[in-house]
Amino acid sequence: MKYDDIKPFLPVIVPVGVIFVVLGGFTGYAFTRIVALTERADFLETELASTTATLSQNTNKFSQNLTDLRSETLRLSSKISNTEQNIDAVKTQVGGVEQNVGSISGTVGNLQKLSQIDPALLKKYSKVYFMNENYVPAHLTDIPADYRYSQTSH
């Protein structure tokens, strides 16, 4: 084939050739993009599976930690309740001690006052002065039998 034989067809062959080259280029580009996107999709699928597995493990750990936290909260709540009861019991005991101390301090004050009073006055007028166990009143008389207590007559 000579150039002169092809010359009349050149206006048709060149654009068709260009079109084939351009289509070939687009096809090649599209093929490489499809291969790259397929590889990227495979990579993302693997990453998604790995992330899903990790999320599942973390969810299980979180659930176990939450259960442990609830148990610990109940245990601590029970301890707090017991401690509050112990505190109330101690407050009650301290209140009783405070009352005893108050009453003792009042008694001590009375005893101090009594110790400063003349013993002769105490013997005559005191309701707190104790008599000797051998004391016998001077004018002691017997009670008549009619006035005595008897278990047979009420």
Image (cartoon, rainbow, N blue to C red):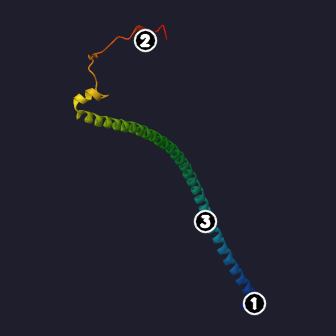
For residue 11, which numbered disc appears in the image? 1
Residue 16 vs residue 93, the one in the foreground: 93
Of the two numbered discs 2 and 1 on the same chain, state the one appearing first in sequence: 1
For numbered disc 2, what is the local secondary structure? helix
* Residue 5 drawn at (x, y percent): 76, 90
User: Is the residue marked by circle 2 packed among few (<14), some (14-19), or many (20+) residues within 10 Å?
Assistant: few
Of the two numbered discs 1 and 3 on the same chain, state the one appearing first in sequence: 1
Picture quarter containing residue 120? Answer: top left
For residue 40, which numbered disc appears in the image? 3
For numbered disc 1, what is the local secondary structure? helix
In the rendered structure, which amino acid carries the disc numbered 3?
Answer: Arg
In the rendered structure, which amino acid carries the disc numbered 1?
Answer: Pro
* Residue 147 drawn at (x, y percent): 43, 11
In the rendered structure, which amino acid carries the disc numbered 2?
Answer: Tyr
What is the number of callouts on the image? 3
Compute the Cα span from label 1 to label 3.
Answer: 43 Å
For residue 147, which numbered disc appears in the image? 2
Residue 114 vs residue 71, the one in the foreground: 114
Q: Outermost residue toward the front? A: 139
User: Is the residue marked by circle 1 packed among few (<14), some (14-19), or many (20+) residues within 10 Å?
Assistant: few
Viewer-nearest of labels 1 and 3? 3
Compute the Cα span from label 2 to label 1.
Answer: 162 Å
| In this view, 9 is above or below 25 | below
For numbered disc 3, what is the local secondary structure? helix
Q: Is residue 48 left or right of residue 20?
A: left
